[in-house]
Amino acid sequence: MDIVIIFIILLIVALVFKRVSNVIIFFGLIDIFLRILDYIGKHTSSDINNFINKIFPDSIPAIINNYSTGVLEDILMWVYVGLMILFLYYVFRMLLHRL
């Protein structure tokens, strides 16, 4: 269910923004958001942790590891790494434009 929600959100973003760079940046922001929520959940009370764990996955790699195995998992993880490299490139490029 987690992976379906993330793909639906990315599809909506792709239809709204229409630029590949915006979709990649949004993908990176989703992963950062999930990691922040995971950290907050693990470092607060058990009630908050249970609530966050019911609604949000740990991160995008956690979703990939949960729903796939073997060669498919390796391929999806390499796609994830490629998207994160593109995210880093676009964020770095935006930083250079601001200097």
Image (spheres, rainbow, N blue to C red):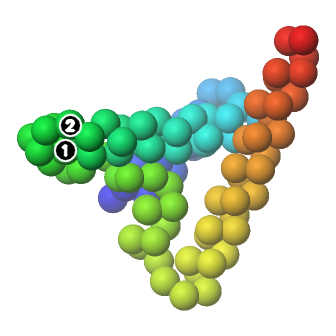
| Residue 49: numbered disc | 1
Q: Which residue is mark 2?
A: 44
Q: Where is residue 20 shown, x and y percent of the image?
A: 77, 39
Circle 1 SS class: helix
Asked whether the beta carbons under mark 1 and mark 2 sit within 8 Å of each other, the answer is yes
Q: Nearer the viewer, mark 1 or mark 2?
A: 2
Q: Quadrant of the N terminus?
A: bottom left
Q: Where is residue 79 shown, x and y percent of the image?
A: 69, 64
The residue drawn where x is 49% and y is 83% is 69
Q: How many marks?
A: 2
Circle 2 SS class: loop
Q: Residue furthest top?
A: 99
One can see residue 40 in this view: yes
Q: Is residue 80 left or right of residue 88?
A: left
The residue drawn where x is 15% and y is 48% is 50
Query: Mark 1 or mark 2, which has the lower sequence index?
Result: 2
> Does residue 78 sit above or below 48 in this rendering?
below
Q: Where is residue 37 shown, x and y percent of the image?
A: 35, 38
